[in-house]
Image (cartoon, helix red, strand yellow):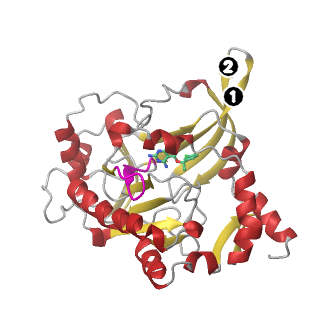
Amino acid sequence: MRVSSRPGSAMAESPVAKRKREDNDGDATAPPGSEAVAGDFPLAELSVCKVLRDSAREKAIFLHGKVKSASGNGKDAVVILEKTPFQEENITKLLKKYTKLQLQMSNDIYSTYHLYLPPELNEIKTTVVYPASEKHIQKYLHQEVYLIQESGEDYTNITLPFIEAQSFSIQWVYNILEKKAEADRIIYENPDPINGFILIPDFKWNQKQLDDLYLIAICHCRGIKSLRDLTAEHLPLLQNILQEGKEAIEKRFNISGSQLRIYLHYRPSYYHLHVHFTALGYDAPGCSVERAHLLSDVIANLEGDSHYYQKRTITFALRADEPLLKKFQEAGRV
Ligand code: DD3
């Protein structure tokens, strides 16, 4: 939580709140994240089959459930419930408008309480994948992880054929690029089909506080699968994402480029080139050394050698249940 104001922002109102007000999107009751494609999700109809993961540190729980359908057998859903960071503009309200303050214990100058809040100050971020495939459900189950050293050859012989055999749908990415979904959430666009991109909040971020700021830049160009496909030919695209992405975030959220962690994942969770922008002070999921590649380093490496990422051995982690791990094991590479 950050109660004191950063320089340049109004004391009582965060940049996010300010933008919200200026946007005058009066409809506060519309369920967020449900625009354009999906409708309301019948949460009350969900019967929980399994707690996939439960993290005290992240204050999140990942559920596998079934939604009753008219035909009888329910469809699978993944529902993620998550307590969100405090919003500084709500703190005053929270301290005044609580419904109950229940003493838990008291000892000398120390005491702890349960603070009960009215519903509007007590929201839970809810992410729904519905209908969910077996893969979606597996993704959130805790698994042992192993580090892989993928050489350029391993990529060509093992990983690339594996990716090509998969039928991952990235329809949601195309929906964003074609403005069929989330069009109203776009923060910035460079419309150039080759060197352009769309900057949009990742849906891991509810945009209510800047502490966990998370945006993604999705390039317009199709067919760049990952870091492994990048050559010096892509430098203009990458420079645009770095430069214009920083400027757009500075303008909209009043956060300077030097306070952003701008990086690519290898391996990515979807094979259409995208770049992550997260608040430097936020320990974002997937920003660990075995996955994140800073965009500025990627650019420097490509400037030094156009085929750097085709040749280099790249380390990444694989979960025990991932079929790709089996491929590496069969090839005697683990
Ligand atoms: C995804 C990676 C993908 C489950 C989950 C998330 N940001 C997205 C659809 C729309 C989005 C994202 C896949 C999927 Cl929980 C399976 O993420 C998205 N829209 N990360 C935005 N803005």
Q: Position of residue 19 (x, y in %)?
A: 21, 45
Front residue (pair 79, 89): 79
Q: Residue flagged by tag 1: what amino acid is it?
A: Lys
Front residue (pair 248, 317): 248
Q: Residue flagged by tag 2: what amino acid is it?
A: Ser
Does the segment drawn in magenta span residue 198?
A: yes
Look at the image and tell me whether residue 280 can be seen. Answer: no
Front residue (pair 151, 130): 151
Lateral position of residue 59 relative to residue 109, left or right: right
From which residue to which does the magenta span run?
Answer: 191-203
Q: Residues within 10 Å of mark 1 (few under 14, many from 20)?
A: some
- Tell me the tag on residue 69: 2
Could you tell me what secondary structure mostly forms the magenta stretch? loop
Look at the image and tell me whether residue 77 can be seen. Answer: yes
Q: Of label 2 and label 1, which has the lower sequence position?
A: 2
Lateral position of residue 169 relative to residue 4, left or right: right
Does the segment drawn in magenta span residue 34?
A: no
- Is ligand 1 less than 8 Å from the beta carbon at label 1? no
Q: Position of residue 33 (x, y in %)?
A: 43, 36
In the image, residue 151 above or below residue 18: below
Q: Identify which residue is drawn at 44% across, 51% down.
A: 220
Q: Which image quadrant for residue 78?
A: top right
Do labels 2 and 1 touch, CB within 8 Å?
Answer: yes
- Is ligand 1 less than 8 Å from the beta carbon at label 2? no
